[in-house]
Image: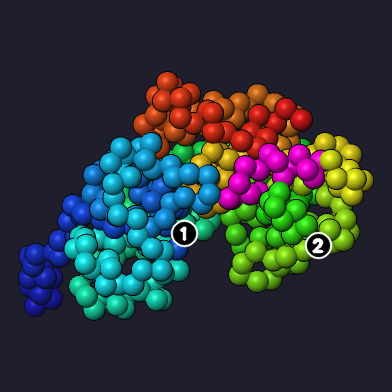
């Protein structure tokens, strides 16, 4: 009887996997991170109907990948479920943080949705696999995940060697317009994770137990007296802010000022520190910034060329024309 039951169950048709979407909408807060990884799948690009804001202040990148992108509707980051449903997409892709506010409403409207965390390297591995499954592109997902795993392995192999003391690192978000305001990331965020993976000692851990950026003043920065100060600016070119801090007599007196280690995190359209597709480049840059001897042969421009080739299909001429002129910050690490 048991054998007959097993045979009967095995003969029943299995539930079919959802078909790959022919129309996709990317929305919600932090939609730029979602859009950039979705556009890393060539199978997904033609399906995109609309995207929430993708300009953090330095321009929108995706129009360089998709010539039709400027004509697509630009959704408000706070748009409600009805806005997405009105576009009649096969799939809506959002950050996981949007599920609480939109998930039940999208379900009630019969709109299929996919939520991506995109906050840590491990999140990226899982979310890339989920996108590969959604778009029938498992091979592409494996290729992209292997790229990130390879970078993590390269940095870990080098930073883990020897007993050299880890440099004391402080990461701050600031700008020329608000030079007296400095914000540090939570321990769980990508910026903090990258410092650890690159072989640094994050001096601000414990100072920001919250879920967002935490404000600190110069007095606290002086008390930490970091060996390396990494400056991030999402909305403006970081070079001006870094130049001002290097000239500031207060920062000149710190260990980072004396050693010339006040550095601007590289940017193109977006800063490389955040959980965007560029985080692998950010990790390589940090590893070279913190361990220059161990990564002396690392060419960040060559690494950026490979990233744009693999993720977005840029050839050398396209990279030189569209990306290279936009590189800002201390990407070349000439200091």
Q: Position of residue 264 (x, y in %)?
A: 69, 41
Q: Residues within 10 Å of mark 1 (few under 14, many from 20)?
A: many
Q: Is residue 57 visible?
A: yes
Residue 146 placement: quadrant: top left
Magenta segment's dominant SS is helix
Tell me what residue is drawn at x 53 percent, y 56 percent.
120
Which mark, residue 30? 1
Q: Position of residue 148 (x, y in %)?
A: 49, 42
Tell me what residue is drawn at x 23 percent, y 49 percent.
47
Asked whether 234 falls inside the magenta stretch, the response is yes
Write down the region rendered in magenta: 232-246
Tell me what residue is drawn at x 37 percent, y 40 percent.
63
**Camera-side residue of 31 and 6:** 31
Tell me what residue is drawn at x 80 percent, y 45 percent.
245
Spatial CA span between label 1 and label 2: 27 Å
Q: Is mark 1 on a helix, strand or loop?
A: loop
Answer above or below: position of 89 versus 57: below
Q: Is residue 199 visible?
A: no
Q: Where is residue 180 in the image (x, y as percent from the top left)?
A: 78, 57
Name the N-terminal-most of marks 1 and 2. Answer: 1
Q: What element carries label 2?
A: loop
**Camera-side residue of 213 and 177:** 177
- Asked if residue 250 lies left or right of residue 183, the reply is right
According to the picture, the residue beneath numbered tag 2 turns out to be 217
Answer above or below: position of 306 versus 147: above
- Colour style of the rendered protein structure: rainbow
């Amino acid at each position: 009887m048991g054998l007959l039951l097993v045979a009967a169950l095995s003969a029943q048709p299995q539930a079919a996997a959802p078909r790959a979407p022919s129309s996709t909408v990317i929305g919600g807060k932090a939609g730029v991170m979602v859009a950039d990884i979705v556009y890393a799948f060539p199978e997904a690009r033609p399906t995109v109907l609309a995207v929430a804001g993708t300009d953090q202040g330095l321009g929108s990148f995706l129009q360089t990948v998709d010539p039709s992108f400027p004509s697509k509707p630009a959704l408000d980051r706070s748009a409600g479920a009805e806005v997405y449903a009105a576009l009649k997409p096969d799939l809506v892709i959002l950050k996981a943080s949007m599920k609480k506010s939109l998930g039940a409403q999208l379900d009630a409207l019969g709109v299929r949705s996919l939520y991506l965390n995109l906050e840590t390297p491990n999140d990226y591995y899982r979310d890339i696999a989920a996108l590969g499954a959604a778009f029938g592109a498992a091979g592409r997902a494996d290729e992209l995940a292997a790229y990130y795993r390879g970078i993590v392995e390269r940095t870990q192999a080098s930073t883990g060697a020897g007993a050299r003391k880890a440099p004391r690192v402080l990461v701050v978000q600031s700008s020329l317009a608000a030079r007296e305001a400095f914000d540090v990331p939570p321990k769980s965020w990508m910026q903090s994770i990258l410092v650890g993976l690159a072989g640094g000692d994050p001096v601000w851990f414990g100072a920001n137990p919250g879920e967002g950026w935490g404000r600190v003043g110069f007095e606290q920065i002086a008390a930490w007296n970091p060996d390396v100060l990494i400056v991030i600016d999402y909305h403006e070119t970081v070079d001006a802010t870094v130049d001002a801090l290097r000239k500031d007599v207060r920062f000149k007196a710190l260990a980072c000022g004396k050693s010339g280690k006040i550095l601007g995190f590289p940017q193109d359209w977006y800063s490389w520190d955040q959980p965007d597709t560029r985080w692998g480049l950010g990790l390589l840059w940090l590893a070279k910034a913190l361990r220059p001897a161990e990564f002396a042969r690392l060419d960040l421009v060559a690494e950026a060329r490979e990233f744009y080739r693999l993720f977005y299909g840029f050839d050398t001429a396209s990279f030189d024309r569209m990306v290279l002129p936009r590189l800002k910050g201390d990407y070349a690490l000439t200091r």
